């Protein structure tokens, strides 16, 4: 909304300027009505160009400017060699114009396709990096981490510290999920938006909405990895594939699902568990229960206690491809 206020103000300023020129320099614009139309046309043209390049980031503009400058310098050096001295006088200007246009275009295209490491080869010992203090670690959240919600607890209890960065394109993805026709997806999207509001309302946390759109990448995952590398942030996600792609590209990341697995309490034979039996087991007499993390517990001789809370002593653990299965026996008092 603020952008449109600026655009309207700029358009009015152009109209006023066109009218002023018509009054003070009538030889340039004759008549006040023509001055208003000229000002309106110029302002509308610039606003139209603004809409056309709205996906053009500051990084891309800087790269294009650098490439244009480099291409112009190369074209000027070629022109100074007097290579076209024998060309016809009437066509020499056309050859020179084509030379500058060609090298300017090639310079811009090559610069926009390059990354910041390429610039360090052109300008040795120079690195383009955001300046921040060592304590200002950036915590970059993807859509899955926001919806998951566990990262909020880690941030609020200071297990994870730093400036929380949420890209604008992640907000757009969350909004699309929250507006989905699928009730399950809609609930997940709204939960993510509520979690972000909860983080913003916490006075101990600093949450920043990053406006970079990374228009050269189409996929959200690719945008996140490029943004994490650019600002030096650590990426937090629950997406296994995104984590592996980030690892291959040397981008630091934390997979919250893997972290939860590593922090899961270890169950050993002899431990006593308080469980609620929910259904029958595969073998006769068995009852099944589940821990909070979803681990299945098979309790022997407990079929008659399904639906009740029991205490069972762990006897063994079986590692499978899907996880760990715990086998347990009822405590003697309940077994009787």
Image (spheres, rainbow, N blue to C red):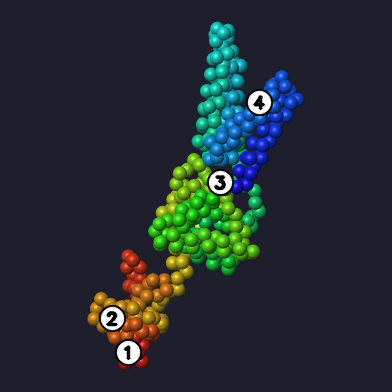
SS label for mark 1: helix
> Mark 3 to mark 2: distance in Å?
56 Å
Per the image, the residue denoted by label 4 is 34
Marks 4 and 3: which is nearer the front? Answer: 4
Per the image, the residue denoted by label 3 is 212
Residue 303 in sight: yes
Q: Nearer the viewer, residue 204 or 5?
A: 5
> Mark 2 to mark 1: distance in Å?
12 Å
Mark closest to the chain's N terminus, 3 or 1: 3
Per the image, the residue denoted by label 2 is 286
| Crowdedness near tag 4: few (<14), some (14–19) or many (≥20) residues, C-alpha within 10 Å | some
Residue at the location (44% across, 53% down)? 242
Q: Quadrant of residue 303?
A: bottom left
SS label for mark 2: loop
Marks 4 and 1: which is nearer the front? Answer: 4
Per the image, the residue denoted by label 1 is 335
Residue 262 x/y as whole percent: 45, 67
């Amino acid at each position: 909304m603020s952008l449109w206020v600026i655009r309207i103000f700029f358009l009015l300023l152009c109209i006023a300027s066109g009218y002023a020129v018509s009054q003070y320099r009538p030889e340039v614009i004759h008549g006040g009505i023509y001055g208003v139309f000229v000002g309106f046309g110029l302002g509308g043209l610039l606003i139209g160009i603004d809409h056309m390049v709205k996906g053009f980031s500051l990084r891309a503009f800087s790269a294009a400017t650098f490439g244009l400058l480099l291409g112009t310098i190369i074209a000027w050096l070629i022109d100074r060699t007097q290579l076209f001295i024998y060309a016809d006088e009437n066509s020499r200007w056309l050859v020179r114009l084509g030379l500058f246009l060609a090298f300017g275009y090639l310079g811009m295209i090559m610069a926009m396709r390059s990354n910041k490491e390429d610039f360090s080869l052109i300008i040795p010992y120079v690195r383009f990096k955001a300046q921040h203090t060592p304590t200002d670690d950036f915590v970059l959240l993807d859509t899955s981490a926001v919806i998951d919600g566990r990262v909020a607890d880690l941030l609020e209890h200071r297990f994870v510290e730093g400036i929380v960065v949420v890209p604008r394109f992640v907000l757009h993805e969350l909004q699309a999920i929250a507006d989905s026709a699928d009730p399950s997806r809609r609930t997940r999207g709204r939960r993510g938006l509520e979690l972000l509001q909860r983080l913003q309302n916490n006075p101990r946390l600093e949450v920043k909405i990053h406006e970079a759109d990374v228009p050269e990448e189409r996929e959200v995952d690719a945008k996140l990895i490029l943004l994490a590398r650019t600002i030096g942030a650590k990426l937090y996600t629950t997406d296994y594939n995104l984590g592996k792609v980030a690892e291959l590209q040397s981008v630091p990341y934390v997979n919250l699902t893997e972290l939860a697995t590593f922090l899961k309490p270890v169950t050993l034979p002899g431990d006593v568990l308080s469980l609620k039996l929910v259904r029958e087991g595969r073998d006769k007499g068995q009852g099944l229960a589940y821990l909070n993390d979803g681990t299945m517990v098979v309790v022997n001789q407990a079929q008659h206690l399904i639906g009740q809370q029991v205490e069972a002593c762990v006897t063994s653990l079986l590692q499978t491809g899907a996880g760990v299965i715990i086998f347990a026996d009822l405590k003697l008092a309940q077994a009787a």
